[in-house]
């Protein structure tokens, strides 16, 4: 009998890590950029973290179409239901706390403890606005006194599709602070995330997608601000702009917005950081509807 | 005049070569990826507008709605006089009078559906009376439906004779024959129905009524464009194709134009030989046209709600 050769132990190949692809969030789906482009994202220390999708102006157009489609459904929800869904977003963010904290720490170059505090503040922001969802109407509207036996009522209604430029320096808390008030009052949003640090925005999109937030209510684009902002500001189907993160482009964007009479919020650099913003970010994105009721008293 | 077909109609139609289903889909999908930009896009948008049969076929149509649509047909973009008028307005027979008055002197055609649209399940006498009444009321184009039940049962002679009779009742009016491809099931049937209608004297073959899903699709239109191309090669007579139903975006419309050019040829790139039956499509064409002019994306707020 021939010698049986010694059995060679099978070589187990090293496991290949499964890396996440950072994509856009448009109409409830996660497409790559229509252009097929991406760009490298580095940490505050200059270490390469991942590649993010580099959106094009056609992605802007697709996002606006998705936001417009979502508008009747979202604005038609009861305020109470919108509040429930916003609270659900807070719950979903809480469940991904570790992931958010890591990304914030890498993007902003802050300590782990500080990153945790930022995530907590972002979660609390959703809870704050969830509470406002069915209350801002009472504050901004109400019964008007008139000199006759009639009812006269004013009620705030959502403006429509809002283009939002997230603050570049605060990729998570800043983003939530500008996005939440816009959708709280029934608008739908097309948001351009921080150009330098877009990864927390994509993770937030994944939380939004699992929060019962209807598809298209929030659409998040990553890419170059200078490329995405002008087509968004000039788009005739966008009804309002939040220029918080627009930086040096703000004046040019305001001029573009004027061609189609958009409402424009152009706050100071760090206005979003106020932990109790009240209605300062809801009021600019509602229209007051006033109705007469012919029989009163 | 209907053509004389050698042998039986049945053996003729079943002798037509079969359609390679996978190949047709691939070819249509392939052509749909073609990129049309800048000046070519501008020309394509204007051509597509000129090819639109602006359609309203609702139970809720009122004279007011038809007049509004007629105004839009004459001058699709009130803000831009360079936007061309559409090819025709397509209405139910009872609205022809209103539409004729509103379109008078504009050069826009007036199409009416007839022959028991959309099902076509009325006796031949009713279909012919329907057609005569529409022509008498001022329709310049008649969109008839074929009897799909008879076609699917293999009673090709009945379908052929009906088309011939309606064609005779049309007089000078153009006859478009609606095959309702969504109910014909196979591409082979679409090819047979196309040739049947062409031999029976159709001036146009049209995909769908718009009441059945699926309506117009690129592969079905491709098969029909092949039919009119080969029919002209065989007989010398040119007929047109109308794709109707489900075409909503300018991008879709341009894909159809690419198909027309590549399958049928340049001779068909004209509103006399190719039409797009649509209602919401026109706004998107106008929006894209304005985008090319101003550089800004437009919104539906700036166009009429039809």
Image: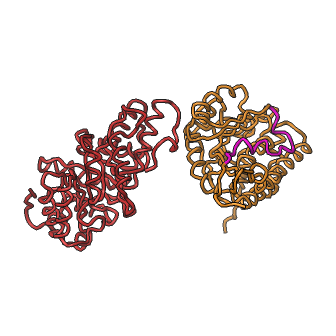
Name the residue nearer the viewer: A45 or A58.
A58
Question: Is residue A8 in view from this perspective?
Answer: no
Name the residue nearer the viewer: B7 or B83.
B83
Left or right of residue B51, residue A113 in this image:
right
Q: Position of residue B72 (x, y in %)?
A: 37, 44
Q: Position of residue A112 (x, y in %)?
A: 90, 44
Q: Position of residue A132 (x, y in %)?
A: 79, 53
Left or right of residue B81, residue A291 in this image:
right
**Hey, which residue is sitting farthest front in the picture?**
A148
> In the rendered view, would you say A115 is above or below B132?
above
> In the rendered view, would you say A26 is above or below B267?
below
Q: What letter labels the chain drawn in red?
A: B
Residue B106: which quarter of the image?
Answer: top left
Q: Residue at x 45, y 30 (%)?
A: B293
Residue B84: which quarter of the image?
Answer: top left
Name the residue nearer the viewer: B59 or A271.
B59
Magenta segment includes A271: yes
Question: Is residue A293 in view from this perspective?
Answer: yes
Residue B199: which quarter of the image?
Answer: bottom left
Q: Residue at x 40, y 35 (%)?
A: B41
Please state the total of marks drawn on the protein image.
0
Magenta segment includes B212: no
Q: What letter labels the chain drawn in orange?
A: A
> Residues in magenta?
A269-288
Q: Position of residue A288 (x, y in %)?
A: 68, 47
């Amino acid at each position: 009998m021939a010698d049986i050769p010694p059995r060679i132990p099978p070589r187990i190949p090293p496991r290949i890590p499964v890396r996440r692809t950072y994509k856009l969030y448009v109409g409830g789906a996660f497409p790559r950029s229509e252009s097929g482009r991406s760009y490298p994202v580095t940490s505050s220390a200059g270490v390469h973290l991942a590649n993010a999708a580099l959106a094009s102006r056609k992605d802007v157009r697709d996002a606006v179409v998705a936001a417009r489609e979502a508008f009747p459904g979202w604005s038609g929800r009861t305020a109470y239901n919108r509040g429930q869904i916003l609270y659900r977003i807070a719950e979903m963010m809480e469940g991904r706390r570790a992931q958010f904290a890591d990304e914030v720490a890498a993007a902003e170059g802050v300590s782990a403890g500080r990153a945790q505090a930022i995530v907590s503040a972002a979660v609390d922001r959703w809870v704050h606005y969830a509470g406002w969802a069915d209350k801002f109407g009472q504050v901004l509207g109400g019964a008007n006194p008139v000199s006759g036996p009639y009812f006269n009522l004013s009620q705030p209604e959502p403006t429509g599709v809002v283009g939002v430029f997230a603050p570049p320096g605060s990729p998570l808390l800043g983003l939530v602070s500008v996005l939440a008030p816009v959708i709280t009052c029934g608008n739908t949003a097309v948001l351009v995330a921080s150009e330098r640090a877009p990864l927390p925005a994509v993770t937030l999109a994944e939380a939004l997608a699992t929060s019962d937030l209807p598809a298209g209510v929030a659409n998040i684009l990553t890419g170059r601000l200078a490329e995405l902002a002008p087509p968004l500001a000039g788009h005739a189907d966008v009804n309002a702009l939040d220029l918080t993160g627009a930086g040096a482009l703000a004046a040019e964007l305001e001029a573009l917005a004027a061609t189609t009479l958009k409402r424009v919020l152009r706050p100071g650099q760090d206005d979003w950081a106020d932990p109790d913003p009240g209605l300062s970010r809801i009021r600019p994105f509602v229209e007051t509807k006033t109705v007469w009721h012919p029989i009163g008293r | 005049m209907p053509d004389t077909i050698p042998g039986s109609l049945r053996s003729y139609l079943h002798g037509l070569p079969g359609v390679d289903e996978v190949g047709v889909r691939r070819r249509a999908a392939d052509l749909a990826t073609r990129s049309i930009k800048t000046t070519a896009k501008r020309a394509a948008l204007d051509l597509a507008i000129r090819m639109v049969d602006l359609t309203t076929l609702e139970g809720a149509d009122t004279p007011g709605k038809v007049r509004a649509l007629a105004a839009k047909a004459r001058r699709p973009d009130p803000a831009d006089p360079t936007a061309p008028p559409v090819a025709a307005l397509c209405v139910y027979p009872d609205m022809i009078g209103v539409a004729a008055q509103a379109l008078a002197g504009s050069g826009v055609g007036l199409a009416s559906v007839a022959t028991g649209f959309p099902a076509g399940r009325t006796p031949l006498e009713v279909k012919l009376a329907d057609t005569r009444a529409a022509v008498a009321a001022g329709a310049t184009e008649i969109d008839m439906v074929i009897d799909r039940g008879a076609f699917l049962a293999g009673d090709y002679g009945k379908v052929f004779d009906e088309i011939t009779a309606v064609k005779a009742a049309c007089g000078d009016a153009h006859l478009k024959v609606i095959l309702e491809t969504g109910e014909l099931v196979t591409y082979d049937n679409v090819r047979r129905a196309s040739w049947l209608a062409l031999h029976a004297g159709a001036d146009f073959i049209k995909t769908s009524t718009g009441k059945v899903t699926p309506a117009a699709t690129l592969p079905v239109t491709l098969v029909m464009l092949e039919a009119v191309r080969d029919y002209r090669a065989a007989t010398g007579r040119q007929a047109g194709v109308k794709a109707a139903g489900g075409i909503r975006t300018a991008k879709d419309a341009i894909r159809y134009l690419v198909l027309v050019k590549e399958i049928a040829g340049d001779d068909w790139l004209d509103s006399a030989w190719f039409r797009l039956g649509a209602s919401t499509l026109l706004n998107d064409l106008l929006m894209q046209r304005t985008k090319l002019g101003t550089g800004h994306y437009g919104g539906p707020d700036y166009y009429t709600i039809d």
